[in-house]
Each structure stands twice: as C-alpha cells, then as structure tokens.
Image: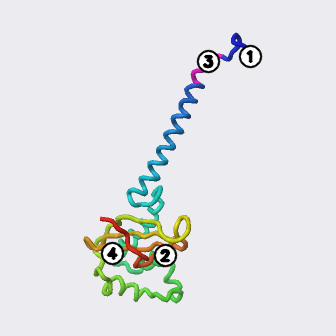
Amino acid sequence: MTLLNAPTYDPGKEKRKTGLVFGGIALVLLTAVVGVGGYLLGHGWFFTNLRAEHRVDQFFKALEAQDYNKAYAIWMNDPDWQKHPEKYEYTVKRFTEDWTTESPVGVIKSHKVDISKTDGTGTFGTGIIVAVRVNGDHKIFMWYEKKDGTLTYPAPHELEYN
C-alpha cells in the first residue's frame, strides 16, 4: 500500500473508536464510584449487604406489627416452619418472649436500619452485622448468616458509628 492508494478516511469509524474509549473510561469510573460508594455509605462494597439489610428490615417490620409468626419465619429463614415446628429447639413461644417481655429495649415500636458490615472468616466473610436503631436511640446489632439466611441476636461484636 502506498500513499496514493491509502484507505479513505471514515469519520464514522473514528467516532466509534472515540466513543468506545470514552465509554470504557466512564464504565471504569462508574464501577469505582459504585464500589467505593457502597462501602463508604455503610452498605458493603458494591452495596452487596443490601439483601441482608432488607431482610433485617422486614424482620423488624413484622415485630412492629406484632406478627411474631412472620418474624419467626424470617428469623429461621423458613416460611413453612409451622409445618414442622419440632425441627427447631428455639420455639416460637420463647422467640416471642425474647422480643417482647424479655427484650432489652421492650416491645419494638420503631426501627431504622443504619449500616452493615461483612464479617467473619474467609475472603468475603461468613455473615453480615446489621446495625439497627430501635425505639428511638437503642442500637441493636443483628447477625445475618450468609450460608442459610438465618438471623441471630446479638451479633458477635458491635460496630462503631454515630
């Protein structure tokens, strides 16, 4: 190929190349912002803890509504627990007592999920600690077990936040 028979200039092709370069840069920046933003806002890298936060939120909504059967189902991650209650040593009766008369914060009247943090062993942790502000200013730290979706209280340790 010589200068005299060089390919003709295609402005569309150049525009596509430029668009791909800028699009790739924008995608990398967006990924970084979403990843770090989730962590800085207290919802895990790339907002990966939102599922656990939603589950804890649903649990506390059921407690507020005094629907202890639904709350127990969320706690055990077993919507059909009533078909086989003998499967669990922790009975719904004891569960109801623990979240009403024996609760350190009393009957749950209001709640707000604040933050969460992945915790435990392994690269991605075995569970998630979810911090919830209950009945105004009482902080409760729930443990969401990743392998089976069950909840536990109290969490292995507390999170430091305002």
**Tag 4 residue:** 65
Total marks placed: 4
| Foreground pick, 100 / 153 | 153
Circle 2: element type: loop
Q: Of the residues tagged 3 and 1, which is closer to the observer? A: 1
Q: Which mark is residue 9?
A: 3
Q: Inspect the image, locate mark 4, and give the three-letter code of the amino acid beneath it.
A: Ala
Q: Does the segment drawn in magenta span residue 86?
A: no
Name which residue lies at 61% across and 20% down: 10
Of the 4 image quadrants, the one containing the C terminus is bottom left
Q: Quadrant of residue 109?
A: bottom left
Closer to the N terminus: mark 4 or mark 3?
Answer: 3
Check the image and name the residue furthest to the top: 4
Q: Specify start and end residues of the magenta stretch as a single range.
A: 8-12
Q: Inspect the image, locate mark 2, and give the three-letter code of the amino acid beneath it.
A: Thr
**Tag 1 residue:** 1
Q: Is residue 136 left or right of residue 55?
A: left
Q: Inspect the image, locate mark 3, and give the three-letter code of the amino acid beneath it.
A: Tyr
Q: Inspect the image, locate mark 1, and give the three-letter code of the amino acid beneath it.
A: Met
> Crowding near pointer 1: few (<14 within 10 Å), some, many (20+)?
few
Q: Position of residue 133 (x, y in %)?
A: 31, 70
Closer to the N terminus: mark 1 or mark 4?
Answer: 1
